[in-house]
Amino acid sequence: MPRPPSPLASPPSPARRSALPPASRRAPLALAGLGLTVAACLGTPPPAEVPPPDAAAPVEACPDVDRDPCVVGACIGLAAGGCAATVCDAMPSCCDTAWTSACATLASTTCARCEHAPAIGASGRMYVTERAGDWPVLWQIDEATGGESLFYDKVAWADWDHDGDADLALGGYCKATIFPNLGTTPATITMGAPVDVDLYDGEPCPATPFHVKSVAWGDVDRDGQLELAVAGERGLALLRHGDAGWTVEHLRPLGGEYYELMVAWVDTDDDQWLDLVVSDPFETTVYHNDHGTLIAPPAAPDGWRGPAYVERNATCDVDGDGTPELVLVDSGFLTILTPSGTGGFVQVGRVDANARGVACGDLDGDGLPELISVDENVHDPDIVPGATRVWRRGTTQEVFTEAWTSPGTYLSFGAVAIGDDDGDGDLDVLVASPDPDTNEGDWFHLFENTTTTPGTIVLVDHPGRYLADDPDRYTTGTSWLPLQPTR
């Protein structure tokens, strides 16, 4: 279903830069997710109904150009017209708080012609490819090319350096690594040298180290510069960048007995400061943002407590009311949470999906996102692989029906992501999977969206594999790299 091209074609005029959507159509702020505080970028105070921050970023923090609405974290909200206005009409927090992954996804299906390249994470390797021929490798990082001790499963793309391109952040043993994006087109991907942030302040990496497995960008202190939350085994930290370089703020003691932490940025109390949501095997809690300082949650039973055993998360406006929800994968369920406005969440839906991974976006063009899940299975040749499933919301968020199931069976390892592979305005689905016959190897499935009728999901399977496939490597992560320029 082709969409019209993005109306963003020229730098905004001063009048456009100074204008924000009128307060009369702003909904209460809820999700901030990944991205910059746009009010900070503007250098203007937030709406009167929300307490303003102590300090706003200088205007130069956001360059005087329109940014690509397909890229998370860019200062899109400074453009009062064009695609930004269309998105902010539907989700006001995209202009009031941050241009998040939910905002970029909505832009892709409404007013921008985004085009993405599949990014595949495997054991010991990550690469960007395209759906052509034998899936050629456009860019790659591995142990031999500067990617020692990195974890390629859960990564984050965002415009960290304000150049309009999506930069890559990922974790590893004792460090987090950022690859600056120096420019991308459908034919060329140029990534800069990796920037490693040492999490042990120069001390040797211990035998049982902080193993970063989850990363999330967010502007914690509203200065127009993204911070990076990193979490995983034996650690939780916030990385800040300043004139002197990177500083590491440990939110939990190094070496603690906690594993598989997942993080997300959400404004849970409607104050326009991003709070950090942390999930571990025991519970989900919120680190409240007190004007740029993250405050640890109170000891139980005080404070909000949410689901345990969270493996993945996603954000989207599930019910179309203008407030994005946070969707967690916990114990096979898809749990849908909406910010309470008082520092926690309210559960508004729960789907028994046998899920290990989740993504969400509008696949059929009806204006409401679907939930895309991948079945919970383990890497065992004696266990029948699972499926990729699409869930459509019914009359309430408590009612979801299975609208589409993959025709084959695939082991997903929980990795599923949505993006527009061909720039046609429809969201395609990317799932990690080993060879379904041998249960080995660096394989994946790109499901092309050919839906033409709202309510009827049609996805066409394009299986792919790494050209020099190694059966000892397994595909464990999927994401999408936005390409430039937006069409």
Image: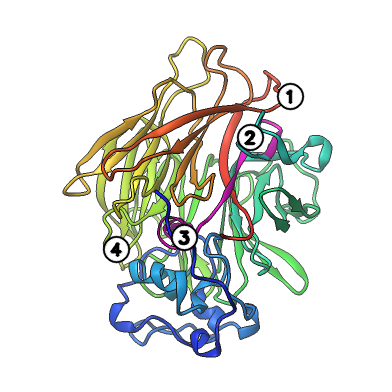
**At numbered mark 2, what does the secondary structure look like: helix, strand or loop?**
loop
Q: Nearer the viewer, mark 2 or mark 1?
A: 2
Specify the amino acid type for callout 2: Ala
- With 143 as the anchor, is 386 left or right in this view? left
Residue 40 seen in this snapshot: yes
Q: Nearer the viewer, mark 2 or mark 4?
A: 2
Residue span colored magenta: 100-127
Marks 2 and 1, the one that precedes in the sequence: 2
| Residue ID for mark 4 | 340
Q: Nearer the viewer, residue 61 or 362?
A: 362
| Count of marks placed on residues | 4
Q: Nearer the viewer, mark 3 or mark 1?
A: 1
| Residue ID for mark 3 | 33
Q: Nearer the viewer, residue 169 or 104?
A: 104
| Residue ID for mark 1 | 468
Label 2 to label 3: alpha-carbon separation: 33 Å
| Residue 17 highlighted magenta (yes or no) | no
**At numbered mark 3, what does the secondary structure look like: helix, strand or loop?**
loop
Image quadrant in which the C terminus is located: bottom right
